[in-house]
Image (cartoon, rainbow, N blue to C red):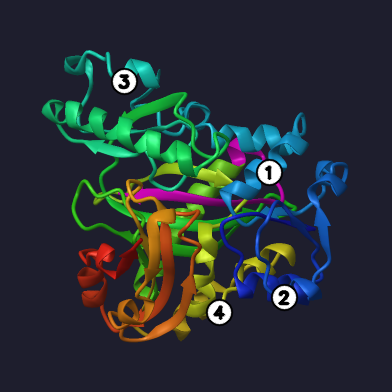
Amino acid sequence: MMMVLDKPYVSLLLSQTLANVGVPAVKCGDIRIPLDKTLEIWQLDEVADRVRDPDLALLCNSEYAVASVYPLLKGTPLMEQAELFKNKIKFRETLRKLYPDFFFRECSYEEIFRLPVETLPFPLVVKPTKGFRSVGVYLVEKPDEWPVMCKQLQADMRAAKEIYPESVVSASSFILEEWIQGEEYAVDAFYDANGEPVVLNVFKRMFAHEADTSDRIYFTGKSVLLEALAKIETFMKQLGHEMQLRRFPMHFEVRISKSGQLIPIEVNPLRFAGLCTTDLGAHAYGVNVYEYFFQQKKPKWDEIIASLDDSIFSFLCAELPLSIDGKSIESVHDRKFEKNFSDILEYRLIPYEEYPTFSVVFYRSPSLKENEYLLHLDLEQYLVMK
């Protein structure tokens, strides 16, 4: 067992769990690790041989950590499997048997600006073949929106180059694919040593409007589990059968149409939800995903669902536009921002100087009204600029 830790954030829950279950941590770069004195910590160059063990249960805390450990996995079956997911074109090609009618095509960054728009099937989504969060992701509903998207793409990819390493967000290749209509869910899960799928979290994504691609709010609770869990487990069984996955953690996103069809958006291998937002499951229904993965346990979902009331558990990522340089921020009015939430479960400060988010807030609500308000909140009003 091994946990690879890198920027941008390590939660207290993650550190506590590593200490409790006795899992060593591999520290990559200058990342702050809570309770680091209680952990067994290795440096990346000390584990070059260990990470190649085919029986190793390996988990990363972020896309940065995946990128750090990736070179050490070169030539291993684990890397070959991970690469099928990290590259969005390979991912779509792998799933062609399950979704034969799904449209997608690859093109270079330069090609995007030369494409004959009249030949494209709208609406469609444009996104980097190798990307992170919603950087460089655009919904283009009709042809006359294409020039506006191209202009924004140029600006955002220039800004992303200053924030993210090439191994995390790359402008070298893009995928164009049909827009998947339906409700969107984010899932943290793994395949155990026997190849059995284990779902750890199901979060539903909220959007401010139809073309919104931000990651501001996700929520979970009884209603979310009841509407999506069974379909997600069925999809994971199909995926596992196709790819023969073992001891394989992942964070993936799907949409479920009004007719009930589940179509995957993307799969992020070797990690759970970024910024340790996966911890929402511990707040909502007591599932500590790190403990469940390293101890290869499966949540008793029937019992969990039966124990829940109708409360909504959410997290909000206070994302900033890529156009704002974090180093130009003097401070954040966190106390003022906190007043927008009725029942805060945890408030996290994120290093906005390096990462375009100033906080992550976990909170509970009796309904979705609070989330609907927060979706449209102007976050820039809480910034004090230099």
Mark 4 residue type? Gly
| Range of magenta residues | 241-256
Q: Nearer the viewer, mark 3 or mark 2?
A: 2
Q: Nearer the viewer, mark 4 or mark 2?
A: 2
Q: Secondary structure at mark 2?
A: loop
Find the residue positioned furthest to the left.
144
Q: CA distance from mark 2 to mark 1?
A: 22 Å
The foreground one among 177 and 114 is: 114
Residue type at the position of mark 3: Ile
Residues marked 4 and 3 touching at CB (< 8 Å): no
Residue bearing the label numbered 3? 112
Q: Single out the mark in the foreground, 4 or 3.
A: 3
Q: Which residue is mark 4?
A: 286
Residue count near mark 3 (Cα–Cα under 10 Å), binned few <14, some 14–19, many ≥20: some
Q: Is residue 5 left or right of residue 355?
A: right
Horizontal side, residue 61 vs residue 260: left or right = right
Q: How many labels sit on residues?
A: 4
Q: Earlier in the sequence, mark 3 or mark 2?
A: 2
- Residue at mark 1: 68
Q: Along the line of sight, which residue is nearer the eye, 188 or 217?
A: 217
Measure how far apart labels 1 and 4 are at the Cα level.
30 Å
Q: Residue 149: where, in percent of width, then height?
A: 23, 32
Q: Sequence-wise, which precedes: disc 2 or disc 1? A: 2
On the image, numbered disc 2 is attached to which residue? 35
Q: Looking at the image, which residue is at 31% across and 35% down?
A: 155
The residue under the point 75% across, 31% down is 74
